[in-house]
Amino acid sequence: MGELVNLWDTRRRRAAAQAFGRWEQKVGYRPQAETRFSDLPDPVLALLAELGHEATLALYDVVLGVRGWGAGERFSYLEAKPKVEALDAFLFLADQVRFDLMRRLGWVRGVAAEAYPIVDLAMRPLEIQAEFSPLVPELTRSYGRYSDLERRLAIEPAAVVRSLIPEALLVFRRLCRQG
């Protein structure tokens, strides 16, 4: 009798091979097909969250790789419609990286980066955004200045959480240096 093959898993493994092929040289770590941002080592997540040149290319490698469009450097050569699709997926991944960093600090909860593999986030950003709630994670009372932001949270929670990204990057970078 033949062996049952899960087509989604096979597709995910192929997409991961293309998406993560250059990650070892760019960020010093090579994820597997099922790896979530929440599974990445702290120094790798910190590097990605900074969105420096190599980290940006690594994220674009994922976005373009899962679509079979090549390496991240090809982004600027895409036609308008695929370029917008790639940019939207890149921005979604960048948000997830930074939200997961904030989750590790204990500042937020409800992050898609915990629930979905990186490859899935890159392949299906619109579906995931439609099915995952909350779209922007909830700020927790563990954040030191929560009471100062409470009024603004009721009005514009996404803006408040995103406004904390620079501070989170500084705090996380310091924690990574301390070991």
Image (cartoon, rainbow, N blue to C red):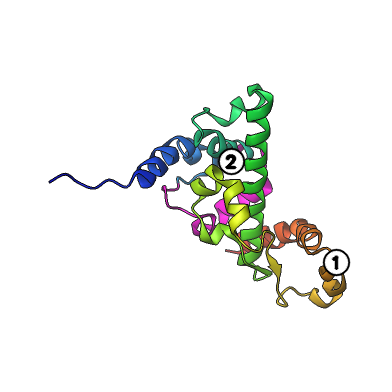
Amino acid type, callout 2: Leu
82 or 72, which is in the foreground?
Answer: 82
Image quadrant holding the C terminus, namely bottom right
Mark 2 → mark 1, Cα distance in angstroms? 31 Å
Q: Residue at x 49, y 30 (%)?
A: 68
> In the image, is 138 to the left or to the right of 47?
right
> What secondary structure is found at the residue carrying circle 2?
helix
Q: Quadrant of residue 7?
A: top left
> In the image, is 158 to the left or to the right of 174?
right
Image coords of residue 145 (percent x, y): 81, 74
Categorize mark 1 by other alpha carbons within 10 Å: few (<14), some (14-19), many (20+): few
On residue 49, the disc is none
> What secondary structure is found at the residue carrying circle 1?
helix
Is 46 inside the magenta-drawn segment? yes
Give the main secondary structure, helix, strand or loop, of the magenta stretch: helix
> In the image, is 126 to the left or to the right of 17?
right
Is 173 inside the magenta-drawn segment? no
Q: Residue at x 42, y 47 (%)?
A: 33
Q: Quadrant of residue 138?
A: bottom right
> In the image, is 51 to the left or to the right of 34?
right
Q: Residue furthest left?
A: 1
Image coords of residue 112 (percent x, y): 58, 59
Image coords of residue 117 (percent x, y): 49, 53
On residue 155, the disc is 1
Q: Residue at x 55, y 51 (%)?
A: 44
Relative to residue 110, is residue 124 depicted above or below? Answer: above
- In magenta, the rendered stretch is 31-55
Amino acid type, callout 1: Ile
Q: Are marks 2 and 1 in contact (CB under 8 Å)?
A: no
Disc 2 versus disc 1: nearer the observer: 1
Residue assigned mark 2: 59
Of the image marks 2 and 1, the number of the one nearer the N terminus:
2
